[in-house]
Amino acid sequence: MLIYMPTPQARAGMHTAMRREDLAPEQLRFGEDAAAAQLRRAWRNVIQALLPRIASSSRRYLEAIEPLGIEDDCVLLRLDNPFGRDWMQRRHLREIQELLSQQLGFAVAARLVGAEDSPVAAPEPPPVATLPAAAPQTPTTPAPRFHPNLTFETFVVGKSNRMAHAAAVAVANGATHRYNPLFIYSPPGLGKTHLLHAIGHVALRRQPNLRVMYLSGEEFVNSYVQAMRQQKADEFRERHRSVQLWLMDDVQFIAGKERTQEEFFHIFNSLHGSGKQLVMTSDKPPRELVGIEERLRTRFEMGLCAEIDPPDLEMRIAILLSKAERDGVILPLDIAEFIADKVQSNVRVLEGALTRLVALSSISGEPLSLSLASDALRAYLVDAPPVKAPSLERIVQIVCEEMGVPPSELRGESRRSEIAQARQIAVFIAREATGEPWAKIAAAIGRTDHTTVLHAYKQAQQRIRNDPKLRERVQSLRQRIAR
């Protein structure tokens, strides 16, 4: 129930301003008093008045605001997005206060708050339809806490992770016999933990009483050692064998620990034999796990082993744009391309670079730019030697000399094979050597549409991958350009 605490003067003003026809158009909501209804209608009118007057970049934040109540002539407005709160505070708070005062009939201030500092309890979510109820959660198996942002909705899918994502979705939706166990492996920072949390979210949404255990390999080892010291091994076994969905992150941590692997082996057999779902992640495929017993490796391979590869350039750009949208940040495409081109192997570092860029922009008051992005990336590329990127004009000139093509023809409309190949190689080297945005590279070869050079880059990438001689020629060109 919403909490309203207006002063006596404010309360008198509210009742004075409230006419009988104000309550006529709609009924009070459940648990809502007349003052709360008036604030709700006042806020609705504020939105209608303000929306046509503000930029599109502000509209999403305005529409996300929820009026909570009045505290000492101050209207509390909830907006969970921190960036959005700061945005609205700096640009529109005065207008909001004026409109609210007009609608309520007395002067009020307005304060934007987030979920963490809101004095008003959040409404309970509506009941979710579930499958036949599972046994209630046992006291010895505390319900895991999954990160609210690590869901399937926030997981960017591409060719590098499509199989792992599809298998995780199937497991989360109850396909316990198709992929059991599900073993997901990749280098660090590519989304394994994200998928485990997403599985947990969906599974508990389907069956709130499902007994789920989520832990890391390190936590398994530590809790087993502690149980042995306290002579509670039987309690440890019962706690693990009673679960219905077992999610273990970084299973490689049990490598080399014989007694822990022995216990793990029996828990695995017990759960799998009784039809319970197991999902594990590791930094390597089962066959490459050193220090893991053969009987465990073969069990890891009983179900489905799904690999996650490093994301390609397009997927890295999509990840950055997705995170920016979730954080309420308007990220220009050329800046996303610049960051994605420089950070290639790890999604965590990729998102961290964006977070640092936004923080720098907020602290300095500067708009997002390529120069600011370059400053943000220095923290992640600290070991890289300083290299001055060659100019696009130099790249075009040397490629034309090497491949016997006049620069005027490369920049022209000719589609002859030798011209087209030289154009593709120039685009490829320009992108790889400078990291310049597509639009700037397009201008350097006489094009106005950046999609043309993006296509040329992909064509060159494919040819270089399949043609060893061309690969050597391009490498030689890059060395010459870098001198």
Image: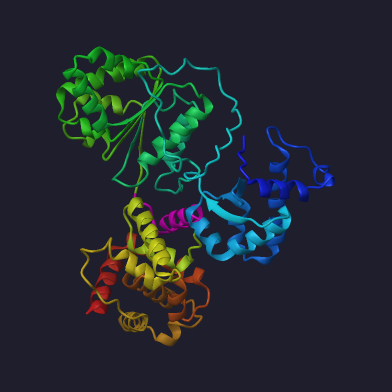
Quadrant location of the C terminus in the rendered image: bottom left
- Can residue 345 be seen in this snapshot? yes
Quarter of the rendering containing residue 5 = top right
> Secondary structure of the magenta portion, mostly?
helix
* Vertical arrangement, residue 478 with respect to residue 22, above or below: below
Please tell me which residue lies in front, 228 or 31.
31
Q: In this view, does 412 lie above or below 164?
A: below
Q: In this view, does 283 lie to the left or right of 10?
A: left
Q: What stretch is highlighted in magenta?
A: 310-328
**Horizontal relation, residue 123 to residue 199: left or right:** right
Whether 383 is among the magenta residues is: no
Pinpoint residue 171: horizontal percent, then vertical percent. Answer: 45, 29
Q: Quadrant of the N terminus?
A: top right
Foreground of the two, 341 or 464: 341
Q: Does the magenta stretch include residue 315?
A: yes
Is any atom of residue 445 visible in this view? no
Which residue is nearer to you in this view: 42 or 390? 42
Image location of residue 206, percent across then percent down: 53, 27
Q: Is residue 411 left or right of residue 356?
A: right
Q: Position of residue 75 (x, y in %)?
A: 61, 51
- Near-viewer residue (311 or 132): 132
Q: Which residue is drawn at 49% across and 17% down?
A: 134
Query: Residue sitting at 48 percent across and 65 percent down?
Result: 333
Q: Is residue 199 above or below residue 482?
A: above
The image quadrant of residue 232 is top left
Furthest-top residue in view?
A: 234
Residue closest to the far front: 8
